[in-house]
Image (tube, rainbow, N blue to C red):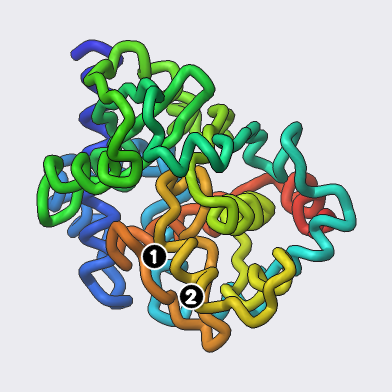
Amino acid sequence: MSDDLQDRYHYALIQRAIDAIDAAGGAPVSLDALAAEVNLSPAHFQRVFSRWAGVSPKKLQQFLTLGHAKALLSNRFTTLEASVNTGLSGSGRLHDLFLRWEAMSPGTFATGAAGVQIRWGWFDSPFGPALIMGTDKGICGVGFEDVAGPDAALADLMDRWPNATYTHDPASLAPLANQAFPQSGGPATAPLYLIGAPFQIKVWEALLRIPSGYVTTYSEIAQTIGSPRASRAVGTAVGRNPISWLVPCHRALRKSGGLGGYHWGLPRKRAMLAFETAQLQAAPSDVTEAAESRV
């Protein structure tokens, strides 16, 4: 099996394993049961899973419980205003994500992105097949296949910018896809192109200030962007984020500790939060301490 085919196989395997863990609803799933689910020996499965997820299946399960969101709010809450004041935002280096971004002009967005050339393709990710869209400036869309199928996900993102020109071109997007979901398990480095209304872009920029493994609330985002009474509007803008995972709308929670909504399904949101927390816990102590000292 070629390296590319093996990587695709492993991505699909990890998705099935995470789905099985999540479907258990917090009940522990043994290594043997998970290995059987994906038709591998327990030892082989443990090695593959740990390589891609960064932690063992048992460790990841600890962060897929229903109470994980509340625990994150208690222990991994980030105050975005403090993040801004300590220099954690900006277009150069964003926490541990190393993401760069720029935004489309409001005028171009108002025309439905008329004249904008957008390429798209499907790629493997630890959270299932990922639809990636991009322009010459960077990734403008990341969506996920859901129960409605890939065509529905494609139509969903295309409807955001109805007057753009779309071309199926996975080959040219492959380098961006590899940056978005690095096979090494390291941080994403892909450039982003934010296409949205001015208020939406302010919210998405606030999301980009949340470090991996940490969370914030809709009301905290509203406060940060200077609209403290706009929590509901913030929630709507978070839900309309077109660049899932990279613009981390999954890190926005309700004050109560509830997950809130997620456009691509709450099981995927739980998996993303668990994945990031597990990787943070598995990081060398000096790296973890450095991340925590920046918040």
Q: Which mark is residue 43?
A: none
Q: Identify the image quadrant of residue 225.
A: bottom right
Q: Nearer the viewer, residue 136 or 49?
A: 136
**Residue displayed at 53% across by 88% down:** 256
Say above or below: 1 vs 226.
above
For mark 1, what is the residue? 270
Q: Identify the image quadrant of residue 206.
A: bottom right
Left or right of 266 in this view: 286: right
**Residue displayed at 19% across by 43% down:** 155
Mark 2 or mark 1: whose residue is earlier in sequence: 2
Left or right of 50 in this view: 230: right
Left or right of 109 in this view: 90: right
Q: Check if mark 2's residue and mark 1's residue have beta carbons within 8 Å.
A: yes
Q: Residue furthest bottom?
A: 256
Q: Nearer the viewer, residue 38 or 106?
A: 106
Q: Which x, y percent locates residue 248? A: 52, 53
Q: Is residue 81 visible?
A: yes
Badge 1: how crowded within 10 Å, few (<14), some, or many (20+)?
many
